[in-house]
Image (cartoon, rainbow, N blue to C red):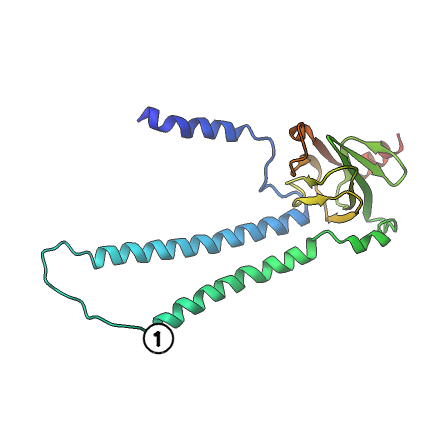
Amino acid sequence: MGIRWAPLIVLLMLVSGCGIRVLDPQSDTAKVQTELIYFSFGIMVLVLLTVFGLMARFVKKYRDDGSSDYLPTQTEGNKKLEITWTVIPILIVIILAVPTTIVTMNQSPNSEAISTAEDSTGEEVHVRVEAERFSWTFRYENGKTSEDLYLPEGATAVLTLRSKDVIHSFWVPSLGGKVDVLPHKDNVYEIENVEEGVYLGKCAEFCGTYHTKMRFTTHVVSEQEYREWLEN
């Protein structure tokens, strides 16, 4: 018994060492994405339990142990059943597709927003994110640069992302989904209402030999701390 469970125990130990938590939303953007994941997962579990439950019921009810010569009524075609098992999957797809499409359209990087990226409203923080193998550079509105990302609590971070070489992927799981960082093209991505804390980020697109080293830390601090850091 112990040997059989050993691989699972080792796997759990390895997983427990992962530093990046995916389902730990710390911004409004990430919360919407997490709610969509849980909603979709709930629908899938409901479908799974229904199918397995019906299968178990039919296996038990119609099990033939060979001791009876009973032959069930033979039927060919059943319009009610055929309509049911056609309509229900369509409804499930619609239920999953509508919120997914809405969230995707609302949160997709929008290159057209570049024209307004420099117009700060006071509630937004604009940061230019430059990626190259195998490092990140964050450039702020006053020209200051850093290797880690700094943001004020409660602000909407407007990130303008561009790569200097190959395709990268910007990902801070606690703050939002993955965003492609393309060469010769800006992608603008908004992260709304970031919460105070320290969050790990990384490149989520294989980009070469030292891809795993392409990590950074996001520091979300109070407005005052952010201003002091920005000015120093």
Residue 225 can be seen in this image: yes
In what quadrant of the picture does the N terminus appear?
Answer: top left
Q: Left or right: 73 with respect to 204?
A: left
Q: Quadrant of the C terminus?
A: top right
Residue 222 visible to an observer of this rendering:
no
Q: Residue at x 81, y 34 (%)?
A: 225
Question: Percent x, y for residue 95?
Answer: 53, 62
The residue lying at 66 percent from left, 42 percent from top is 26
Which amino acid type is shown beneath numbered disc 1?
Lys
Q: Which residue sits at x=37%, y=57%?
A: 50
The residue sitting at 55% across, 28% down in the picture is 17
Relative vertical location of residue 47 with respect to residue 224 in this rendering, above or below? below
Observer-nearest residue: 182 or 139?
182
Per the image, label 1 sits on a secondary structure element best described as helix
* Residue 74 in picture, x, y percent from top left: 21, 70
In which image quadrant can residue 221 be found? top right
- Residue 138 lies left or right of residue 30; in this view the side is right
Q: Examine the image and state in which quarter residue 171 appears.
A: top right
Residue at the farthest bottom position: 79
* Label 1 CA crowd tier, 10 Å (few <14, some 14–19, many 20+): few
Q: Look at mark 1 in the image and give the residue it sits on.
A: 79
Q: Position of residue 137 (x, y in %)?
A: 79, 34
Image position of 131 with respect to 4: above or below = below
Answer with left or right where residue 82 lies relative to residue 72.
right
- Where residue 219 sits in the image (x, y, percent)? 74, 34
